[in-house]
Amino acid sequence: MKKAYVFPGQGSQFPGMAKDLYESDARAKELLEKANEILGFRITDIMFNGTPEELKATKVTQPAVFLHSTVLAKCYAGFTPDMVAGHSLGEFSALAAAGAMDFEDALRLVSIRAQAMQKACEIKPSTMAAIIALPTEKVEEICAGCTGIVVPANYNCDGQIVISGETDAVNEACGKMKEAGAKRALILQVGGAFHSPLMEPAREELAKAIETTTFKVPVCPVYQNVTAQPSTDPDTIKKNLLAQLTSPVRWTQTVRNMIADGAGYFMEIGPGNVLQGLVRKIAGDSVTIEGMSTVK
């Protein structure tokens, strides 16, 4: 039975995240203090003592979630993955944990990504919405028929797809989804249209940073969001990581492919338990699923 480690994305943050890790593990404290230096502000103060509102700031959220997950993986002696994957931002955690990038380089990329995405969000009114209990093909069909830009952004599990795009187009799509029988079409409280063509300015900015970053062969295959396929080739990893900003997160397909390739045990490493729930919905009782948010 192969072990799959999965890493959460933005939205899993919470006040006090990684504080017990910092206080109980010398290596974790060293890495988190190094992160404060790299970022140029004490992100640990916000992670440990900040309000939910302070943690929601994009320049904080993405590095905070990355740090919690990656530092935890690096301090966990039992981290011996046969394969890894991460949801959106979590792909950076997966790559760093598997050795495809140095910790410092990955953190710098995450910080650049967060700020570039924030700037892209400010260019045009945009949003995302969760569509519940509507077939995937119907969601795709409705998005394609709307005026303006709206696309599937996260294929989270069967019956749960997040759409992303211009605010008017997302609102139009939500109305049509409800008419088509969706149980819910819920506008999300997010900064903008992540994983849509509206992130193109952020993709261009991130491209410059990715091109100057050294990528290495990871210790195990990394299943990437854009293709849902495993990769160990540094050039392929870079290309897919960049395309991720404007492409959907194919999480359902990713988990199914990991199971098809032998994964029988999944562990979510980092804050929250969102991915445990999604894997359970995708895999049912066919796999073992656990989570870890501090060193065991």
Image (cartoon, rainbow, N blue to C red):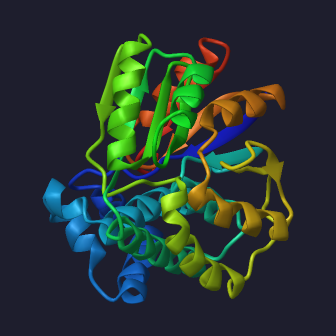
Residue 52 image-quadrant placement? bottom left
Residue 170 image-quadrant placement? top left
**Residue 61 seen in the figure:** yes
Above or below: residue 36 compared with residue 287: below
Residue furthest front in the image: 147
User: Which quadrant, please, contains the N terminus?
Assistant: top right
Which residue is painted at 33% across and 48% down in the image?
A: 167
Which residue is painted at 46% across and 48% down in the image?
A: 148
| Relative depth, front residue between 224 and 162 | 162
Q: Is residue 247 left or right of residue 123?
A: right
Which residue is painted at 75% across and 34% down in the image?
A: 258
- Residue 62: image location, x then y, percent: 40, 63
- Residue 54: image location, x then y, percent: 17, 64
- Residue 79: image location, x then y, percent: 64, 50
- Residue 140: image location, x then y, percent: 58, 30
Q: Is residue 39 left or right of residue 209?
A: left
| Relative depth, front residue between 161 and 56 | 161
Q: Is residue 17 left or right of residue 227?
A: left
**Residue 25 seen in the figure:** no
| Relative depth, front residue between 19 and 147 | 147
| Relative depth, front residue between 262 and 20 | 262
Q: Is residue 177 left or right of residue 222?
A: left
Question: What count of labels does the image hold?
Answer: 0
Which residue is painted at 36% across and 65% down in the image?
A: 121
